[in-house]
Image (cartoon, rainbow, N blue to C red):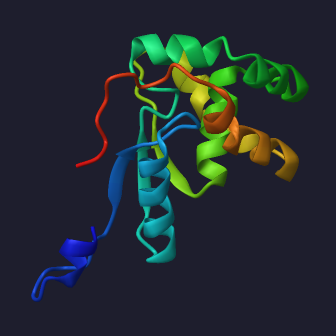
Amino acid sequence: LKELESLDGVAPIANNQIEYNPFVPESINETFDFCEKHNIPITAYFPLGGDIANKAKAMKNEILGKLSTKYGMSVSQIMLRWAIQRGCAVIPGTGNPKHMKENMEVVNFSLDDEDMKTINNLKHTVTGFMKGMDYSN
């Protein structure tokens, strides 16, 4: 992104679409921070934890489960709401009408500041996500 921004005659970056969820590696969080600092909107794909295996792990996360109970929302809704409150557009992707309806309901509640911090810190306390993925390039 820094290289793109430094090029003459190139249109400004209008959006950065990245995998973004509470479990992404620090390099992705650095990209998020860079975009936020430079007013580059983020569109989050895989906002529910990643591929099928990682999503299944996220859905079973104890902390997210407790927040799901607290708010009366599904773990998926908690994760989508977290990303939205972080300033992301989210593209969870589903063909299931039940999930589509559930995804739309995330605008009907907000996570409090303490719960946002708790979810932000999951990346420091939860292991086993995104094994083998190289984000260094």
Residue 93 visible in the picture:
yes
84 w.r.t. 40: above or below = above
Residue 105 visible in the picture:
no
> Residue 68, located in which quarter of the rendered image?
top right
Residue at the extreme bottom of the image, as rendered: 8
Q: Give the image location of residue 76, x and y in percent.
A: 62, 24
Q: Give the image location of residue 52, x and y in percent.
A: 41, 13
- Residue 62 appears left or right of 30: right
The residue positioned 47% from the left and 17% from the top of the image is 54
The residue positioned 52% from the left and 24% from the top of the image is 100
Q: How many marks?
A: 0
Q: Give the image location of residue 25, x and y in percent.
A: 47, 40
4 w.r.t. 82: above or below = below
The residue positioned 11% from the left and 88% from the top of the image is 8
Residue at the extreme right of the image, as rendered: 70
Q: Give the image location of residue 104, x and y in percent.
A: 60, 34
Relative depth, front residue between 96 and 90: 90
Give the position of the N terminus as an image quadrant.
bottom left
- Residue 62 appears left or right of 99: right
115 w.r.t. 103: above or below = below
131 w.r.t. 96: above or below = below
The residue positioned 49% from the left and 34% from the top of the image is 47
